[in-house]
Amino acid sequence: MDDARILERERYQMEQIRQLESEELQVEEVDEESSDEDETNYRSSEGASASGEFTYDTSLAALHSYLGDVEDTHNRLAFLDGGAVLNVPLFYLEGVVLFPEATLPLRVIQPNFIASVERALRQVDAPYTIGVIRVYRDTNNGRIKLATTGTTAEIRQYRHLEDGSVNIVTRGQQRFRLRRRWMDVGGSPCGEIQIIKEDLPLRTPREAVGRSTPSSIFRSGVHIQIPPTNRSRADEYGFGNENDSDAMSEESFESALSPTERRLHQSALVYCDMLDNSASSDDENIEQQSRIQPARSSFDNFRSSFGMGENKEADGLRLTLGKRSMPTHNTWKKCSLNQFHQVPRAFWPSWVYQMYDSYSLAQRAAGRWKQIVRAPSMDSYITKPDLLSFHIASKMPVSESTRQELLEIDGISYRLRREIELLESFDCVRCRSCETLIARRSDMLVMSSEGPLGAYVNPHGFVHEIMTLFKANGLAVIGNPVKEYSWFPGYAWSIAECATCETQLGWLFTATKKKLKPRSFWGIRSSQVADDSR
């Protein structure tokens, strides 16, 4: 039933494309008042669609209909184990960084790469799989260099053309490290790759940063169940659930600490036990006077209390039941012993744990992404921080070198933290060659259901990753609009160059139908965007 619904939806979308392509090219002059109105509509929440002014179906661009009728391979691969080594055909792509779960269309023209596709379709170890590596020029000497971290891509759709070329649509699968490469007898690039073992999302122990329960619970042998800090197996982790099956005991938490941290943690529990004994006396509710040292951290006081300070004799803890003998000090403060019971049983403060909590970071990243891109709800991704980190990295409208940096980061929490940093600093789109300001963050426009940045292939086989903008500055349009082979059905394209340095930055797309909105937008190549986005 699901397949039938998908096919029916695709038939409807293809019919829409045919209707759009049957229209005659109509380029109209738009007066300044209309332009201001369109700009206001584009800036509205979740694009202009919220106000009814955005009429373009963004799902059409994600179909890559310009490739013609492609056949589904009906092949869906199981994920390979981390550390697995295999040989696959390699595709070197300039200006492209492929991430897991991202779509990559290819038009294969050269005979050696056509042979690579044929080999991938029939290989046994990893059928329908190719390796995608970014190739780039060294800015210092202009030499061609290859990245060592890439992504496997599964061939989902393909079509053999009469001229011998092949059109395929692939889907990113898993990251890998390139161990070695060679050319086979037919001249096809091949490589030995090793699948990267991805980590699992980290969780902060609830009791490590939350409200602590009475320490008498630990004396009675009852342990508070808390989520694990890190597990190497999904069944041990149980990420996405907050039930007791994914919890661990206090001993398990202590086992993850270093010897020094463990001693301090256990000393803190002994301290709480002493406070419990003290509070159970007849005068439990009487306010006690305790020594507070000014201009010292709680960690310094803690070390001093257990003979770890400079003066062990002066800093020794002296508590007795009934009459209490406290160390003399110039500064005194009244406080209730109950306050000590609220102290979290953790060596580090809560903000330290949250820096590495994948779920907390995922929520921050999703909120920032929605604010900038005006994307729909990201709730489904928040429970899957690993997928969210790849999703944002593959769609983030930044330079290709920055996206390659994200691909090479090992660790979900580290990747999310870097993405949050980029999203918070991202504001400007500049020409890579001359640093001319092209657009700002507020000028972004989502024209594809896959996001504000996507990969598209031209008739000559060159793949371009472009970010879509409703407004751009300092660009010159070259030539008349062309309707054929448009990446966005219903729009004609014209080449756009930087007016300062005359570098081709992308294209201007103009509507071919009167009722189609937006009337025009820009597609800027990420390979021509400067690294600095501030």
Image (cartoon, rainbow, N blue to C red):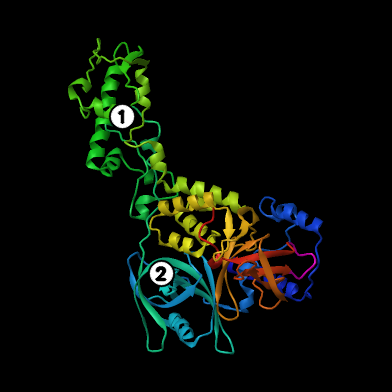
> Which image quarter: residue 122?
bottom left
For residue 23: magenta?
no
Q: Which residue is mark 2?
A: 147
Q: Nearer the viewer, residue 533 or 339?
A: 533
Q: Nearer the viewer, residue 118 or 27?
A: 27
Q: Does residue 105 lie above or below 246 as drawn?
A: below
> Which image quarter: residue 90?
bottom left
Answer whether labels 1 and 2 touch (C-beta < 8 Å): no
Residue 47 place in picture, x, y as percent: 68, 55
Between disc 1 and disc 2, whose residue precedes? 2
Q: Is residue 74 visible?
A: no
Q: Nearer the viewer, residue 479 or 489?
A: 479
Q: Does residue 392 lie above or below 144 as drawn?
A: above
**Does dot 1 land on a helix, a strand or a loop?**
helix
For residue 516: magenta?
yes
Looking at this view, name the residue that lies furthest to the left.
313
Residue 224 place in picture, x, y as percent: 34, 36
**Does dot 2 land on a helix, a strand or a loop?**
loop
Which amino acid does the dot numbered 1 rest on? Ile
The numbered disc on residue 217 is: 1
Please name the residue shown 48% across and 59% down the image.
390
* Left or right side of 254 for 450: right
Residue 394 place in picture, x, y as percent: 51, 62
Residue 391 place in picture, x, y as percent: 51, 59
What is the CA distance from the residue labelled 1 to the residue labelled 2?
Answer: 54 Å
Q: Is residue 122 visible?
A: yes
Please name the residue shown 78% across and 69% down the image.
513
Q: Which residues are magenta?
A: 511-517
Label 1: how many Cα within 10 Å (few below 14, some 14–19, many 20+): few
